[in-house]
Image (spheres, rainbow, N blue to C red):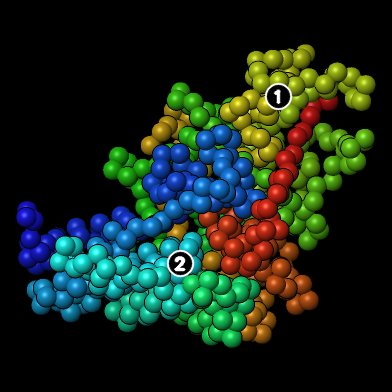
Amino acid sequence: MNIIQDKDVFKVESGVTAYMMRLYYDLPIEDFRMTKDGFRGWANVPSTGNCSGEMLIILNDMLWDSPSGDWFQNWNYGAVRNVNYFLSEFPNYKNNFTQEQADGWIGEAYLIRAYYYFAMVKRYGGVPILKEVQYYPEQSIEELKVPRNTEQEVYDFVIEDLDKAIGLLSDKSPAKGRVNKNVAYALKSRVCLYAGSIAKNGSMQLNNLLGIPKADAAKYYRASYDAAKMLEGKYSLYRKHTDKFENYSKLFLDEDNSEIIFAEYFSYPDKTHSFDVVNIPYQMRGAEGYSSRLNPTLDLVEMFDDVNGNSGVLDIGPANNPTRFEKTMDLFKNVEPRLRASVILPGDIFKNESIEIQKGLYTSYPSGELMTGADFNALYQGKNIIGKSGMGHPETTITGFLLRKFQDPSKDKSQVLLYKSTQQWIDMRYAEVLLNRAEAAFELNMKDDALKCINDIRDRAGAKLYDANQLTESAIQKERRMELAFENHTYWDLRRWRIADSYINNKQYMALSPYYI
């Protein structure tokens, strides 16, 4: 017997709001707390990057291989049932509210259900579509068995729900962290882009449970483009600060932000995360320990060209005659500001300190003794052998780089503790919409529009602008990987582009190991 009846929930605004908050809680947002085992984990390592080449994770229990088949699992039909129940029962009570209120809640429910199903279809392909609430034992086991729909049917269902949401929602969210019509357009742009690229790059398999016909690619690209275009003039790239490094760094921390379309917000003590404590450089770690868990790869770092458009591949010289620098940052003297704002480079400044990352020390080179180890107290002529933040110690970087993106540089060391971080997770931002639009426009042979979108992003990043001849499919993909690095997009992008095998299978990612001489 239910203690709280529907009439107690759906008849009053506070009850409906509480029910909606449950639906929001179940949104599979791939935020700071997503792990390979699911959502809202404690480890605070956005871990799709661990198998996309963006970064490596230093904890053995966070490294894995493919046989288990349950990476980033999301098979939550309980959440689907909750939203279906709302869509079925709430209309019986909507006369207790204004038309705008009722339409808004129903629109939110359709968008949330679309989000649930998109999270499943991008993982599993075709899944069973349930639009109605199932009841047991009122329905037999056979009646409760629902076969898988095709991948295309699921994508079309998601798009249908988003169109319903667009028709019901207003431009303004009812409260911070809740959705509106523009969020629906942004999600539709993302969803349709996935469908278009799966149609273009994939093949039909398992009696159409996987795959979308190639003939339909243009239809989905067009829908993605049109949805992205609807947000033009409503949002803009974050450009509050003249200095491009400062501007890009603060983009992810500033909540008063023209780029944010939909974000998940945190506040102490009700809802927090631990991103700072698990990623802070070792030399700054607090009393609880932890540091350096997410380590960007050299592969990712070298993807960024310098500010003059030259290749980002580092000039380190041949193995038998490595290049020497006065300071490690001399190696990165012309680096793109967006890279510096995303990755802590060896010797760069973070929280007013130079972050010392080195593999070891040569007493002289090449004939002198090579000194390495894992002891931060080990000195040679007063110099730390491995610097203050690695490499070689089990709790420091294994790639030579640390993550700057998302970290709060204003947080005092005494406050870098478990469950004390509150910076937002931006789930949808206008830069992604521009990237969606550019990719779709390129596929629709609207290359001038694609170039405009890409160069808008590159200008904000401090990168050299492209000319028309440089705009290729691979250039657009590369720009997306750089701009959205560590935001849990790349793994899914590599899959939908059907190029994951080139970047993941039997791939040994690279590290940078500086030595002091």
Give the position of the C terminus as an image quadrant.
top right
- Helix, strand, or loop for circle 1? loop
Query: What percent of the width, then of the height, locates residue 447?
Result: 68, 81
Q: Nearer the viewer, residue 118 or 96?
A: 118
Q: Which of 176 and 400 is in front in this view?
A: 400
Seen at 59% across and 86% down, the residue is: 215
Q: Is residue 494 above or below residue 65?
A: below
Q: What residue type is labelled 2?
A: Val
Q: In this view, does 32 lie above or below 370?
A: below
- Helix, strand, or loop for circle 2? helix
- Mark seen at residue 386: 1
Query: What percent of the width, then of the height, locates residue 396?
Result: 61, 30
Query: What percent of the width, then of the height, locates residue 331?
Result: 79, 42
Seen at 90% across and 25% down, the residue is: 365
Q: Which amino acid does label 1 sit on?
A: Ile
Residue under numbered circle 2: 121
Q: Is residue 290 above or below residue 245?
A: above
Between marks 1 and 2 in the image, the one whose residue lies nearer the viewer: 2
Q: Nearer the viewer, residue 515 or 293?
A: 293
